[in-house]
DNA sequence: TTAAGTGTTGCTCT
DNA sequence: AAGAGCAACACTTA
């Protein structure tokens, strides 16, 4: 689930529930999710500390500690954060539990164990060492910065959008929506886009991700809350294009399933310009 | 029943 | 050397 919009909402959840509460205990329920640190060392490092800020870069969430330094959170395919008070409400697949002195808890939930949690000294250095591209919702990520990315050699627009080293935050689902809104075929070569298409794509990145955050990505009624011309609610086998009604097409890009409307999204090499 | 699929990413092989 | 293929994992669906 967690692409940029989901992680942004986790960040807000962290900030709304878990700041400035002293950590009494940190319990590692499955050590597979730890990266570069042992359970004991993590617990020792965090005990008595407080989270004072949540900051996001792409799909990564970092929680700043009151004595400097950061807890780093990555969610893989199935992770999330959940704050709760009653111990009976502890969610299934809780892999790391933060117990606050006031009796409340924050759970790092991760069914498939593909996420990772660690520590970092410096936010910028962490982003650099993870070799992440610019966060696509950062105001500093502007059209000029995007054009630099477009000039990078990539096999297809969809692969480019999902490459975290080029652009941080976009995954399989949102790359489909962005390309649908920009009316570009996922297999189009980035270098073949004309100026108008480049602008359209840049605008779609910002708009789709901002819309997803505003409409509550990942929530129960998220799909129903999206604008009527969005692909996401129809992104499945036998789905129909919300714009023209045509059957959506399923393709494989880099081992991932992608969906597109073959009528609305032209521009792949050999398919004409869009 | 078994196999294939799923919102991530990191490694290997070419 | 960029890109495909697959493994890591747990669960659901065909």
Image (cartoon, coloured by chain):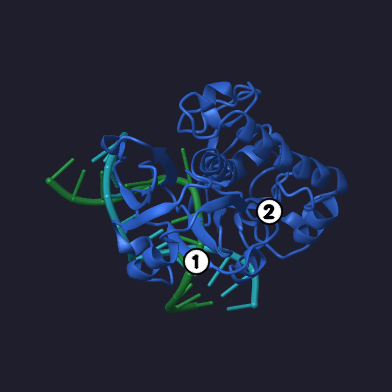
Chain colours: A blue, B green, C cyan
Crowd around label 1: few <14 · some 14–19 · many ≥20 (10 Å): many
Q: Is residue A156 above or below residue A228?
A: below
The residue that mark 2 highlights is A135
Q: Is residue A225 left or right of residue A182?
A: left
**Mark 2 vs mark 1: which is more N-terminal?**
1
Q: Position of residue A42 (x, y in %)?
A: 40, 66
Dot 1: what SS?
Answer: strand
Q: Position of residue A213 (x, y in %)?
A: 62, 35
- In the image shown, does A262 or A33 lie closer to the viewer? A33
The residue that mark 1 highlights is A119
Q: Is residue A31 above or below residue A162?
A: below
Q: Is residue A57 above or below residue A31?
A: above
Q: At 81% from the left edge and 50% from the top edge, which residue is drawn? A: A142
Q: CA distance from mark 2 to mark 1?
A: 20 Å
Q: Is residue A273 visible?
A: no
Q: Position of residue A130 (x, y in %)?
A: 58, 67
User: Which of the numbered marks, if any, corresponds to residue A234?
Assistant: none
- In the image shown, does A36 or A154 lie closer to the viewer? A36
Q: At 64% from the left edge and 31% from the top edge, which residue is drawn? A: A214
Determine the image quadrant of residue A197.
top right
Q: Is residue A215 visible?
A: yes
Q: Is residue B8 left or right of residue B5?
A: right
């Amino acid at each position: 689930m967690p692409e940029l919009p989901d992680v942004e909402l986790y960040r807000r959840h962290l900030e709304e529930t878990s700041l400035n509460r002293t950590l009494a205990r940190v319990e590692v329920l499955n050590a597979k999710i730890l990266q570069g640190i042992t359970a004991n060392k993590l617990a020792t490092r965090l005990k008595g500390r407080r989270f004072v800020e949540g900051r996001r870069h792409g799909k990564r969430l970092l929680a700043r500690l009151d004595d400097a330094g950061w807890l780093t959170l990555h969610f893989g395919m199935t992770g999330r954060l959940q704050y709760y008070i009653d111990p009976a409400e502890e969610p299934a697949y809780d892999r790391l539990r933060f117990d606050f002195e006031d009796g409340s808890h924050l759970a790092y939930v991760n069914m498939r164990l593909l996420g990772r949690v660690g520590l970092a000294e410096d936010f910028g250095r962490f982003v650099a060492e993870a070799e992440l591209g610019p966060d696509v919702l950062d105001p500093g990520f502007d059209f000029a910065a995007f054009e630099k990315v477009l000039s990078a050699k990539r096999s297809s627009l969809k692969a480019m959008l999902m490459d975290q080293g080029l652009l941080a935050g976009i995954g399989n689902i949102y790359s489909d929506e962005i390309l649908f809104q920009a009316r570009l075929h996922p297999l189009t070569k980035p270098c073949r886009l004309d100026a108008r298409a480049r602008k359209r794509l840049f605008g779609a990145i910002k708009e789709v991700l901002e819309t997803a955050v505003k409409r509550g990505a990942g929530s129960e009624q998220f799909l129903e809350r999206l604008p009527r011309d969005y692909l996401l609610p129809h992104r499945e086998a036998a789905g129909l294009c919300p714009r023209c009604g045509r059957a959506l097409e399923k393709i494989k890009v880099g081992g991932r399933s992608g969906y597109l409307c073959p009528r609305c999204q032209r521009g792949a090499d050999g398919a004409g310009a869009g």
